[in-house]
Amino acid sequence: MRKISVLLFLAWVGFLFYAGIALFTSGFLLTRLELTNHSSCQEPPGPGSLPWGSRGEPGACWMASRFSRLVLVLIDALRFDFAQPQLSHVSGEPPVSLPFLGKLGFLQRILEIQPHHARLYQSRVDPPTTTMQRLKALTTGSLPTFIDAGSNFASYAIAEDNLVKQLTSTGRRVVFMGDETWNDLFPGAFSQAFFFPSFDVRDLHTVDNGILEHLYPTMDSGEWDVLITHFLGVDHCGHKHGPHHPEMAKKLSQMDQVIQGLVERLENDTLLVVTGDHGMTTSGNHGGDSELETSAALFLYSPTALFPSAPPEEPKVIPQISLVPTLALLLGLPIPFGNIGEVIAEVFSEVEDSQPHSSTLAQASALHLNAQQVSRFLHTYSTAAQDLQVKELHRLQNLFSKASADYQRLLQSPQGAEAALQIVITELQQFLRGVRAMCIESWARFSLSFLLLHLLAAGIPITTPGPFTVPWQAVSAWAFMATQTFYSTGHQPVFPAIHWHAAFVGVPEGHDFTWLSALLVGTNTFASHILFAVGCPLLLLWPFLCESQGPRKRRQPPGNEAEARVRPEEEEEPLMEMRLRDAPHHFNAALLQLGLKYLFVLGIQILACALAASILRRHLMVWKVFAPKFIFEAMGFIVSSVGLCLGIALVMRVDGAVSSWFRQLVLAQQKAGEQSSLVYMGAGSSAREAQSHLLPPYSQDLLASGTSLFYNSKS
């Protein structure tokens, strides 16, 4: 029962730390309340008349659709500079020889030949830059939570309003082919689907070839309204070889041929969208918020003229979630309820102005619908949750009210109102961009509850009396050695540095068990924490292994005083770890003390990470350095605490076995002493002399102690 109490007390202390970690995670990392409200054509986003473009149109929703079909080509990890042309050689400068430049040649030719039909944007991605979070953002227009990065390979169905749900609710036939993650996010949403496994990052061709097998036959069949493809070859090539490998040039050239084949098959009522969900680093990884990871390409093309002017020299930079409201209005759908993205205004311009200021008015109408939807979301969200900044919320709502009133007034008399419309457009854009900035800031707020629970756990007394006290220096050094081993084995506390190849250790042909992959990767990542936590109880034995080897006189049993005077003095060998038997009642207390000290040192590390993340929560590198560091430290603490309990339980089990052996040894000695008493007067010390040749020195001492107890009881 004493041993069970030690383990239960350690588990309770660990639970306090777990609760603090959970509270800090919910209070600091990007978190928000997910609303299940849905937009519908029957419910306009706000008061006032619908835009002029939707009046009297049969089947029109918030705005009349410009396209009846959509082809969405998602090329995983299509970094923005992958779509850049090969730079010409300038005299005096070395030629550019990056293998990924200029491989999307057909895309560049379309931009040059048909400038009013195509446009290239630099899509700015919100961290974390992992596939599942990006898919949520690309379909809901919202900000996914940062902690969802840990479930990148175990995603769940999206409960929020999204583009796929809006398409299926209006009877559109949605066909998908590619990454199987979409099946987890949108189960049963597709009229036809071809899913392919995505976990094996060493496989560059299976998913892409599977898509190409079905892509063109599906397009030619015409049995679709929205066609979505998710290619993985570029992303897997980055993970396996990096962006500068010649294999990347081959994959990009393949994607260029895919785009060309799609453009040749497009009809006039179809919009083509080619985009990347995120970028990649120079090593081919992603997950953080570096410039290369958050920079993706976005390409729009229509067989009919879509843009009133030629593209600028430098592509515009737009938030990735801007694609959601833009596609919704272009397809005649309601904007998803929780969207906070801003429409790409220029795609709503009139190529040929049939009326004065019609292009400006069309842009203002799209922005006003977008702003109404966002304002409705803010009102609903602020009623259900209290994590938005009240002062900033009121300021933004006042800005929207003014811009909406000006817009409604201009609808009544649009003649001669070009300058006023531009002012309204600017105000609406300020409102939408302000809302997005407020949401990012408000959904990353620090909670002090973590500190309170941490101090409660750290305040538990951990000093116990007894002869087996392990110094703080030894415990701290042991914990730091675990951290040093973590780094020396090639690990870093950032998501791109995770050794994903460990998922295939022992199974080179691959497997379909996600739990096994997670177990292998987790064991590889936190191996140092596991080994040092399980081995932490060994610190109790170290002082005895290092005790001095000074001469000590061996104890003699009663009745041998004369023999001791005759025989020369012998040195007693140190008992070392067997001295734990001298005070067995202190052993469990010593284990508890050591466990609490180790948990305290690990808790101090988590506290330091939490303080750094909270103090620097507005720093540019918070999502790249501080938040991932805290997540890794928290996971390391959980793994270490479990390993510590297992190690202590194992030592207790060994201690129980040794204690049982000692009891049997003493009983055996008592029986031997009882027999020797019968021949004590005649045999002398011959039996003890025989035992001294058969047993090791420390056992001789223990047997001598047992014999002494026996004679005392006799007397």
Image (tube, helix red, strand yellow):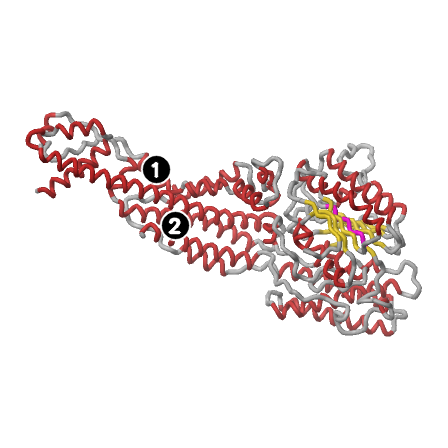
Residue 406 found in image quarter: bottom right
Specify the amino acid type for callout 2: Leu
220 sits left or right of 35 in the view: right
Residue at disc 2, secondary structure: helix
Specify the amino acid type for callout 1: Trp
For residue 542, which numbered disc appears in the image? 1
The magenta stretch spans residue 51: no
Residue nearest the observer in this picture, 419 or 701:
701
Residue 516 found in image quarter: top right
The magenta stretch spans residue 72: yes
The quadrant of the rendering that contains the C terminus is top left
Q: Position of residue 695 (x, y in %)?
A: 23, 30
Q: Residues within 10 Å of mark 2 (few under 14, many from 20)?
A: many
Residue range of the region highlighted in magenta in the rendering: 70-75
For residue 327, which numbered disc appears in the image? none
Q: Residues within 10 Å of mark 1 (few under 14, many from 20)?
A: some
Q: Position of residue 162 (x, y in %)?
A: 71, 60
Q: Position of residue 521 (x, y in %)?
A: 56, 42
Q: Position of residue 21 (x, y in %)?
A: 50, 55
Residue on which disc 2 sits: 596
Residue nearest the observer in this picture, 495 or 430:
495
